[in-house]
Amino acid sequence: GNRQMALDELADLGPDVVEKFGPKGVEVVGVAVLEPESDANAAIQKSAASFTQLLDADGKAFEQVGAKKFPWTLVLDANGKLIYFDLEYSSATRRELKQALLATVR
């Protein structure tokens, strides 16, 4: 909720991914980790993120797969294979994410 990188990513994923790649079968899922539900909802509203959002308030699900550095950006193909990841959101991540999707989505 208070991480500017996460808020930027929430705002960018709609126009960058959902709008452009959604018609080709790409889905976006956000996961708020170690956030109270009210803070997660406030961040979603502030960023106008309109894609699926999940809440892992206690972090127990996330600790199964990762470290505590946020936000993570992961792209999985239709078979669940990891094809792209980035550990912090930035303008470079935004550009590379688009490139990964263009190279993957047909």
Image (tube, rainbow, N blue to C red):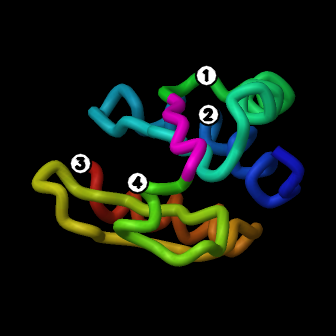
> Does 55 lie within the magenta span?
yes
Residue 84: image location, x then y, percent? 39, 71
Element type where label 1 sits in the image: loop
Find disc 2 in the rendering and name its residue: 14
Amino acid on which the number 1 mark rests in the picture:
Ser
Q: Quadrant of residue 81?
A: bottom left
Q: Earlier in the sequence, mark 3 or mark 4?
A: 4
Which residue is located at x 54 percent, y 36 percent? 55
- Disc 3 to disc 4, how far (Cα)? 32 Å
Disc 2, disc 1: CB below 8 Å? yes
Work out how far the residue at label 2 is from the one at label 4, CA to CA, in angstroms.
Answer: 25 Å
Q: Quadrant of residue 44?
A: top right
Question: Mark 3 vs mark 1: which is more N-terminal?
Answer: 1
Between the residue at mark 2 and the residue at mark 1, the CA separation in whole angstroms equals 7 Å
Q: To which residue does mark 3 refer?
A: 106
The relative height of residue 30 versus residue 96 in the rendered view (above or below) is above
Q: Residue 19's spot in the image, x, y percent?
A: 53, 29
